[in-house]
Every structure is written in structure tokens, then in C-alpha cells.
Image: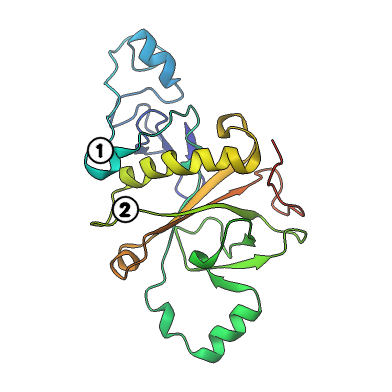
Amino acid sequence: MFMDPAQGRWVCPRCFESNEADAARCVKCDLERGADPATAAATGTAGTSGTEGAQPAPSAPGGPWSAAPAPESNRPGWLQLVLRFWWVGLLVIGGGIAAFNYLGGSRPIEEMAVGDCFDLADSNAVEVDDATKRECTEPHEYEMFFVGDLPDGSYPSDSDVDLWVQTYCFPAFADYVGLEYDSSQLLASYFTPSEGGWNDGDHSVQCAMRDPNNAELTESLQGAAR
């Protein structure tokens, strides 16, 4: 379980359902807040009290999304900071203004590449359109470690995106950092297109990491093994 700092909610570690901050149990799978989903599954209870039967964990969605099964994780940190960026109308920005922003380090988040270090204007924002690129030796908060594309089709649901992220970003994190995500001190975030951006042809997902104890890193986290 984790608290979403932007929304004051908590997310179920078994089915990833977002719940109200004062909810004692998950509204989707009835897991008791704070319970270990692995223990609950083994004992047949919904939480730590052992007084109610557990609801079965949701199965992966069907269709093309189920082709690559997601690895299990006891810490859904990928949902720690779910940011959706919005760039509808971005391409109509005046050339002079766009050139000034680019030279100043600000660029659309979808242009960030693996290994780029950057900052956001507001880390708690639900929708962002650009980021400020930094040298990794300069103070910065985020570092990009994986970029990929969602499958073509209709605009994906949150569960579809979560499955894709678990399937591709978890392994990429381990390769980049040198440590499995569940064992790492670092937190990961992912950026997905808005529905408008999706309809305009952008299906990319950017996966970034940060150190929750240091918002002004001055070195790359690649190979940090922590």
C-alpha cells in the first residue's frame, strides 16, 4: 500500500485500485488497508484480522495486453507518482518562444531519452507537458531509464497501462540500476499520453526514477545498485 501525495488516497497492493484516504478496505478486492496481499492470499483472508474471506485477485485483461504477463511485485511503487502529460496544441506554439524554451532546457517530456536527467515544474501535477533537462552532474530530481510504445488500438485503461508498465519497466529498472525494483530505495514514475495525445498518434510511455531522500541528485543513478 502507498499514499498518493497529490490526491491523499491509497492504492491497493493487490489489485492497484485507488481508494479514499479514510477507506479501511479496498473497494475492489476487499483487502484490508495495510495488509500483505501475499499473506492474505495464503491464509484465505482479506486482511490481517482473519475475519472475512478474500476476494480473488483480478486477472490480467484480455486481448493483446495479456500477451506478455506482468511480473509480480510486492511494492507497487510504479503507481507512486502517476503523471499524465498533455501536449494538445503544443505544436502550435510560436517558433520564437519554442526555440527559447528549448535552448533554456525545457522540452516536451516525450522527447526525453533514456539516461536524460531532468526536473518538473511541479512534481505533484497530474498533467505535465514539458520538463527541464539537466546535466546529470547538475542538481536534478528525475532520470529517465526506459522509453517504449503502448500497442496500437483504442485509448488504454489504467489497468492496461499498469500491466504494460509492470511487464516492461520493472525489468528495465533492474537492468539500468543493477538491482530489482522491490529491493531498491529508489522510486519510479511513468508518464503516459492524454487521450487527446493518443488520438494524435502518440503512444509512448516514459519511465523515470528518483531518490525520495534527495531531490537534488548530482550524479546518474545508472548502476547505482541501491
Q: Secondary structure at mark 1?
A: loop
Crowding at dot 2, Cα within 10 Å, few <14 / some 14-19 / many 20+, comes out as few
Residue shown at 42% from the left, 39% from the top: 167
Residue 62, image quadrant: top left
* Side of 40 where 58 appears, left or right: left
Q: Nearer the viewer, residue 112 or 45?
A: 112
Q: Which residue is mark 2?
A: 151
Q: Position of residue 55 (x, y in %)?
A: 27, 20
The C terminus - image quarter? top right
Question: Label 1 sits on what residue type?
Answer: Pro
Residue occupying image coordinates x 48% and y 89%: 94
Q: Is residue 169 above or below residue 197?
A: above
| Position in image of residue 35 (x %, y %) | 44, 20
Residue at 37% in and 32% down = 23
Residue at (43, 39) in percent of width and height: 166
177 displayed left or right of 204: right
Amino acid type at mark 2:
Pro
Residue 20 picture location, percent across and down: 37, 39
Could you say which is closer to the camera, residue 166 or residue 139? 166
Q: Is residue 50 visible?
A: no
Residue 61: image tag: 1
**Quarter where residue 87 is shown:** bottom left
Looking at the image, what colour scheme do you see?
rainbow
Which image quadrant is residue 19 in? top left
